[in-house]
Image (cartoon, rainbow, N blue to C red):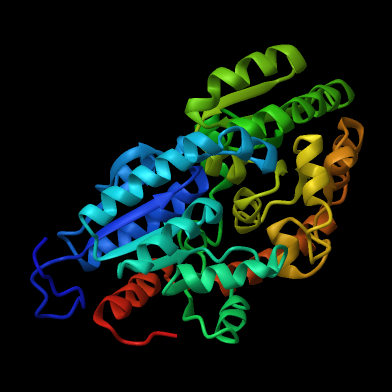
Amino acid sequence: MQARDPSGGAGATQSPRVAMVAGEASGDLLASLLLGGMNERWPGLQAAGIGGPNMARQGFDAWWPHERLSVFGFVDALKHYREIAGIRDQLAQRLLDSPPDVFVGVDAPDFNLGLEARLKSRGIKTVHFVSPSIWAWRGGRINKIARSADHILCLFPFEPEIYHAKGIAATYVGHPLADAIPLIPDKEGARQRLGFAAADQVVAVLPGSRRSEIAHIAPTFLQTVALLSRQHPNLRFVLPAVPSLRSMIDPLVAQYAPDAPLAVVEGQSHDALAACDVTLIASGTATLEAALFKRPMVIAYKVSPLSWLLMKNLGYLPWVGLPNILLRDFAVPERLQHAATPAQLAADIMAWLNQPEHVAALQVRFEALHHTLRRDTARCATDAIAALLGGGAHV
């Protein structure tokens, strides 16, 4: 590999070679937005590793598809440990044989931090994009982060101070979804694209983007759809499915909600959120997307019984949903594990639909949050990576 000037200055004639790993659909989206900023700064950028279709559209060379790393909960991770560990070992060896200028691990900390530590120990600069939720649970992980990453790119404004206190370089870059999602969503256009009328009451159903999430969460969500449909026949429903999971979702719809007015669409999660009046949504990055679309939501979360037993005592905060964590309040309901029953979820959905004044108040809070997170993330993150490659401190 030829020497290159990665500083991005006027005299730069070559671009860095970047390795990246994104482990699921949300990481693929975040990584693609970062790649957009890096491609703008470095038009000759070479980027390869593990990723998905959004990254591929930015010229990323996916040696493995991100679905290979998509697991949910401790039990699923254990089931797939040998396969995932094998992929990590193969990737590490490939990168050590032909070192990139920088490795960027996008979320997926259980996979990426160990890989980053191995690369960093051999002199490869490492960046972790999306701070692990050490402020919510598994706070002892910060010591592993210090061994693994030269720099942390933080999505939320309170995170860098936590790392600086431990001597870890970190930069608040805002959240790229806040840049990508308009401050005023186009509800009318989204409804037209999805085939809904302006007067329809629409519920978006987002049971997750991983196979294990569909297995654990989708049946309850679809039972909720069926219940709501019986109680309120005028409601309309839309479920945006990850294309690779459509074969799992369609049989579940046929089993649990065969007669409900439910449209299953491939992708189009942003259209679904823009079009809906309320969303029933699995805990994860999608809840932040819903907040940025200014939509009231009911957050639910289910894992296997053993995973729940292992996880339930590890949390530091009273909230699991990102909107609630960022607002530091139970702004939207959270129904976890046994509390996530169809009857409870249906009641929560109707509470939003029947209380427009509460929806309006929530939307004011979500708009303020949107402004806080909108920072031109791609540029800020690329600046931090350029500073790291140039050897300068950027904290």
Q: Pick the residue in front: 166 or 392.
A: 166
Q: Pick the residue in front: 287 or 2.
A: 2
Q: How many marks?
A: 0
Residue 170 in the figure: left or right of residue 387? right
Residue 348 coordinates in the image, percent (x, y): 87, 43
What residue is drawn where x is 53% and y is 85%?
Answer: 167
In this orientation, does residue 259 appear? no
Residue 362 coordinates in the image, percent (x, y): 76, 61
Q: Quadrant of the N terminus?
A: bottom left
Residue 344 coordinates in the image, percent (x, y): 91, 38
In this orientation, does residue 107 appear? yes
Please determine whether, in this image, residue 18 is positioned above or below residue 91.
Answer: below
What residue is drawn where x is 46% and y is 35%?
Answer: 68
Residue 391 coordinates in the image, percent (x, y): 28, 83
Where residue 338 sits, quadrant-wise, is: top right
Residue 304 in the figure: left or right of residue 84? right
Q: Pick the residue in front: 168 or 42.
A: 168
Please determine whether, in this image, residue 123 is positioned above or below residue 283.
Answer: below
Q: Pick the residue in front: 6 or 296.
A: 6
What residue is drawn where x is 70% and y is 42%?
Answer: 281
Q: Quadrant of the C terminus?
A: bottom left
What residue is drawn where x is 45% and y is 55%?
Answer: 30
